[in-house]
Image (cartoon, helix red, strand yellow):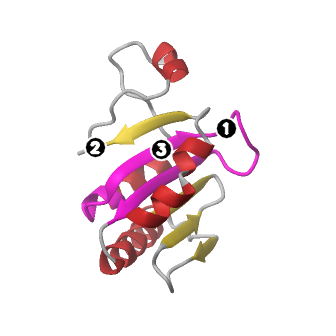
Amino acid sequence: MNLPMNETPQAEKQNNSAALPSFPQLVTLVSEALLEKKAVEIKVLDVRSLTTLTDFFIICSGNSDTQIKALANNVTEKIKEQTGEQVWRKEGLGNKKWVVLDYVDVVVHIFNEETRQFYALENMWNDAEITAIEE
């Protein structure tokens, strides 16, 4: 897994060395589970300094209802298997346009492309440090 440099200007200042950002284990495990099922455009938003709701948002897209369901299932299974932690709240599996997996400190948003464009969470939280996750 390759974690490129953050995209926001303030993040570039903070991470100007060649070292990759270090994330809590849960963020890394969720990212790996999403990559396993070929999630599209995975972004990690570090919102610790912006809200008390959570520490990190992980946002990605799936190309079909089937893939969105597979992404959500893989995340919940891998996290439970590797950490014993269960998802605190899960929403959206019925319509598969926007699935939310809430692990309290990490909230995972899995969108179809149209819904992701409409809500544009990355733009809403544009003051966050944003890291693109790629294989």
- Residue lying furthest bottom: 94
Mark 1 crowd level (few <14, some 14–19, many ≥20, 10 Å Cα): some
Gap between marks 2 and 3 measured at Cα? 11 Å
* Segment colored magenta: 34-62
Q: Nearer the viewer, residue 18 or 8?
A: 8
**Apparent side of residue 38 relative to residue 96 in the rendered image (left or right):** left
Residue at image mark 1: 48
Task: Tell me where residue 65 sits by quadrant.
Answer: bottom left
**Apparent side of residue 43 relative to residue 70 in the rendered image (left or right):** right
Residue 59 located within the stretch drawn in magenta:
yes
Q: Which is more N-terminal, label 3 or label 2?
A: 3
Q: Residue at x 56, y 68 (%)?
A: 100
Amino acid carrying label 1: it is Arg
Q: Residue at x 67, y 38 (%)?
A: 48
Residue 134's mark?
2
Residue 83 in picture, x, y percent from top left: 48, 61
Task: Tell me where residue 46 sits by quadrant.
Answer: top right
Q: Is residue 38 above or below residue 72?
A: above
Residue 44's mark?
3
Residue 104 in picture, x, y percent from top left: 66, 58
The quadrant the N terminus occupies is top left
**Apparent side of residue 89 relative to residue 43 in the rendered image (left or right):** right
Q: In this view, does 112 lie above or below 119?
A: below
